[in-house]
Image (spheres, rainbow, N blue to C red):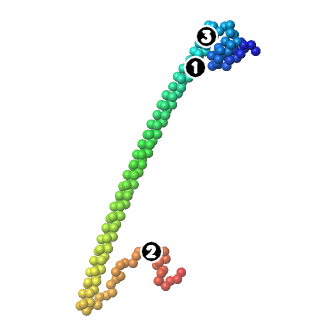
Amino acid sequence: MTGDDVVQLFAAAGGASILTAFINALFNKRKLGAEATEIITKGAAGIVERVEADNKRLREEMAANEMRHRKELGDAEARHQQSIGVLREEIAQLTRTVSISDSRERMHLVAEERNRSHLERWHRYGDRCDMMLRAANIDPPEPPPRFPEPLVPAYPNDHDVGSGVVD
């Protein structure tokens, strides 16, 4: 393999123009002058063109990536804001529900207190009437129980307790 073959091999590999020029200069010391300078200049110009083209392509890719990224961030922000809106509406609904529940609970407690107070007054009245009748030597009939029996037993099969019925 001759020096020219080595030079052609490196030149075919591409991107090694400067290296080729130096190798060519080593094998052909006679032609070092203008020809070597021209080859080095052409090689450097080719490299500069490729670097500029790569830089341009990379800048375009970066701009496209940045635009895509900004769009994705905007979409994510929109989804996030929508989720926040949905959650705020759910919180408002829950707040209304709790408020209604609290209001009903307060109304229930007031009604229970009124009922208890009314029953106590009624029983005091009944006791006074009973004392007055007995003081007048009138024997009143046995009154009904002070408080009504519960409508629903507290535990299953409570209605059987004390009835004498065995299962």
Horizontal and vertical percent position of residue 93: 39, 53
Q: Secondary structure at mark 2?
A: loop
The local crowd at label 1, few if under 14, some if 14 to 19, many if 20 or more residues have their Cα within 10 Å, is: few
Q: Inspect the image, locate mark 3, and give the three-letter code of the amino acid beneath it.
A: Thr
> Measuring 32% from the left and 65% from the top, which residue is drawn there?
107
Q: Taking 134 as reference, is 7 left or right?
A: right
Q: For mark 1, what is the residue?
A: 50
Label at residue 123: none
Looking at the image, tell me whether mark 3 or mark 2 is earlier in sequence order: 3
Looking at the image, tell me whether mark 1 or mark 3 is earlier in sequence order: 3
Q: Taking 85 as reference, is 25 left or right?
A: right
Residue 33: image quadrant is: top right
* Distance CA(mark 1)–CA(mark 3): 20 Å
Question: Looking at the image, is mark 1 or mark 3 nearer the viewer?
Answer: 3
Q: For mark 2, what is the residue?
A: 154
Q: For mark 3, what is the residue?
A: 37
